[in-house]
Image (cartoon, rainbow, N blue to C red):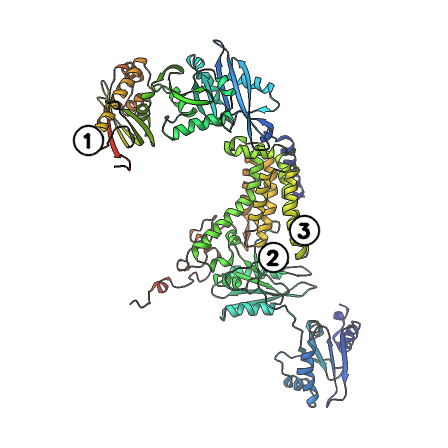
Amino acid sequence: MWFRKQPAEQQENNLVALINMYKKSGDFVHFHHPQSPLPYWVAYFGTLIDVEILHRDILPYLNKSAFTTLEEIKAALPFEDVLITSDLQQIQDQLLLGSVLIQLDVNDRACILVRAEMKKAREVTIPEEEYSVVGPKEAFVESITTNLNLVRKRLPISELTVKEFTIGTLSKTKVAVLFIEGITNEDNVNTVCQRLNDLQFNQILDSSIIAQLIADNGHSLFPQLIDTERSDRVAGVLAEGSVVILVDGSSHALIGPISVMGLFNAFEDYYVNWQMSSAFRLIRVFAVSFSILVTPIYVAVLTYHYQLIPKDLMVTLVSSRRNIPLPPILEAIILELTIELLREAGARLPSKVGQTIGIVGGIVIGTAAVDAGLTSNVLLIIVALAALASFTTPVYRMGNTIRLLRFPFLLLADLWGLLGIAVAFIFLMIHLLRLTSLGRPYLEPIYPPRFKDLKDSFIRVPFSLQSTRPVFLQTKDPQRFSKQKASEVKDIDE
Amino acid sequence: MKKKIKIAVVLLIIFSSYMFGRVQRQILDDINMPSAVGYDYVDRHTFKATTVRPIYRPDKSVGNRTFIASDELSTQTFSKINQQSSRQVVTGKLEVALYSKEVAKHGIGDLVDSLQRDPSISERLFVAVVDGETNKLLKKKYGDRDTGAYLSMLIEQNMNSGELPTNNLHQFLNAYNSKLKDPFLPLIEQKGENVHLKGIALFKDDHYVKNLRQDQQFIFQALIENIKLGTYKLKLKNKKYAAIENINTKHTYRVVNLKKKPEINVDVKVRGIIKEYTGKKTDEKEIAIIKKQVEKELEKEATAMIRTFQKLKIDPIGFGDQVRSRTRNFRYQQWLDQYPNVLVRVKVNVVILEKGVVD
């Protein structure tokens, strides 16, 4: 700004000029208090500070006795971070963050800055995206202090370190990197910190913007950082040795590095016993592959590979397609698009109207399309099941990825049949093999094979067998708990 | 610049694959999928092929439609049928291939070979010989399914319940191409509203030679494979009948004197339950009699059957393979010369496990 270039001698005047400039904003308050024992000047943004703090904790102390120096005022005020400064830049920043400026004389160079910002945040509510029936129901809110408080409460240890950054030339968003010293690999922390430091962006509105900006491969469909709104999940992965990024103004934390198996894990899995969570995880893996492959396989088989259809299924398939004028690919694309339209419309509309849309779309359009002879009812079932299956992924972004992945598979299935599906699958595998998350291989533990990490991937073995932290996080302290001590039986029998 | 070239190459690949990379489409409801084919004899060189294709109606009922064409070559008949059809004729859903006895007598090697050469035809296709015209058999609709499905279910069901030894295109070709074995096929016949299994047709190379007698079918099957869930009817001396069911059999081959003149000993173990008996009582004594009689009967049948095989110089059971697998430097010609005079001893051991719940 223009006043930065001014020589130091004119600073005195510039503070006046700054205040005069701020006075152009209607919510800037600047007044003189001549009646008190010592007259003083106060300036602040009325919309940024908590007026109650000003009236209760600042003004009464100023009016009590006569101060002669700023130091005396600082000693008298009941705040821990009272600042005496004459640095214009600092004054400017602090005023915009919600500080109250106090001057003994309007032409003084130095002033006192007292933080009295208004702390408005939503109440901590139950998670909506990652709702779980069992387990704690505590979701992050849009305030970073509340979120940090939620995490700290679950990890009351001195090793939990928070590194703060301010990112965004316009938004000045506070970003915090959380990790546990002595557990988390420093390489991971350094990677995150360096990428955050290097960020050149004007506005950080949400953590998902950070996730896109610091992703290893920004063009990939796959999320390379998991975002979660559950404070228990954040505490859990911190203890495993991951790095967590919290962003002010965002109700989602980012977790990294991750492997692809992390996308199939709901945190609820740790709250039910291991047999059930293993079964659920296997169902999710099945659901994802089903969701990607089933429509392309339908198209490929009906277009090229009639030999593969068992003779008992033939009656159902052929008679349902008898009156349909469209080739299987068009039939499939029409239905897939319908489902996507329904999802998109449901997401855009207010929740009450959204339900109606679901009914209209699901029942009316579905039945009408079959009755009109545009699609076969077999495909209708398949597409609906595939859409349903894509919603089983615990990470919401993953579901979107899967639904989008279906379309290249569909087109290649139409082009070359099952061979096309194989080609698409090979491309997908190549992409996943090359993908990294904060420099760690994405497809771990499948490739590179880390058999130890299989204990918490497709299945979840009981906690007694999970005495080590995941290998791919390369933790400093791989031991989670002492297996030997845990296996000692101390119960008194009989 | 490099990026632009990359994008251009990708676009070119996509474009050219869509323009030129197309495989012929065979959309399920736009093709004519015959489910059964039958061959009838016309003269020495030509034959008549009948195909049946199912018609799937939107109300989920199934109809039949037959196409007929005559030619010297099997593949040509299909293209002639294609000329009659409004939809492209494809062979991938063939379930059954039938040959009339006349065709079978003149040799079906080339016809079956053409089935094998078509990659879209399943190796598990059922092949059968029809007593009578296949055309007549295929024109009729049986049951609620199309004729091809009906016939394949008929044959498969009987194989699973132990009425027929397992046999399909693959096994037929295996026996046909082997120097030692001779193929056999199920023999079916149309009788009124139904098709029924008449027996087993024996082949020498690819020529039909003889039917297997119905009463020899059980021991024939027991010598080829381990029967599960078989049934056997026994006629006792005093005009009484006994039915043995749930039969499990197990055979063990032993070959002695391999060097000079091989002799084959076969032990057949038969374990079953007496389900029906027209006599008064089934006590220990009676069961011992039944057991003895079954053993005697089966041994007699086996010996007679093997005798006929040796007289006809055919080997559908595969004794040759048993000997070959036990001989170093096996000489085919020597064995084929020896075969009619090889001694085959069949010893049957019957175990009656139960005699029913009553008494």
Q: Residues within 10 Å of mark 3 (few under 14, many from 20)?
A: some
Q: Which mark is residue A160?
A: none
Q: Residue at x 57, y 42 (%)?
A: A381
State the residue position of label 2.
A211
Q: Is residue B21 above or below residue A58?
A: above
**Which of the 4 quarters of the picture holds residue B212?**
top left
Query: Which amino acid lies under the numbered mark 3 shown in the image of this protein?
Result: Ala
Q: Numbered disc 2: what chain?
A: A
| Tag in front: 2 or 3 | 3
Q: Give the position of the N terminus of chain A as an image quadrant.
A: bottom right
Is B161 left or right of A221, judged from the image as shown?
left
| Tag in front: 3 or 1 | 1
Q: Residue at x 46, y 62 (%)?
A: A476
Q: Residue at x 70, y 84 (%)?
A: A59
Report, in whole angstroms, how far the alpha carbon at label 2 lies from the one at label 3: 26 Å
| Tag in front: 2 or 1 | 1
- Residues flagged by tags 3 and 1 on a common chain: no
State the residue position of label 3.
A345
Query: Which amino acid lies under the numbered mark 2 shown in the image of this protein?
Result: Ala
User: Which of B278 and A181 lies nearest the eye of the viewer?
Assistant: B278
Q: Are marks 2 and 3 in contact (CB under 8 Å)?
A: no
Query: Which amino acid lies under the numbered mark 1 shown in the image of this protein?
Result: Lys
Q: Could you say where residue A100 lies in the image, as x and y percent from the top left?
A: 70, 78
Q: Residues within 10 Å of mark 2 (few under 14, many from 20)?
A: many
User: Which of A136 and A257 lies nearest the eye of the viewer?
Assistant: A136
Can residue B239 be seen?
Answer: yes
> Residue placed farthest to the left in the image?
B285
User: Which of B68 and A335 lies nearest the eye of the viewer?
Assistant: B68
State the residue position of label 1.
B285
> Residue placed farthest to the top in the image?
B44
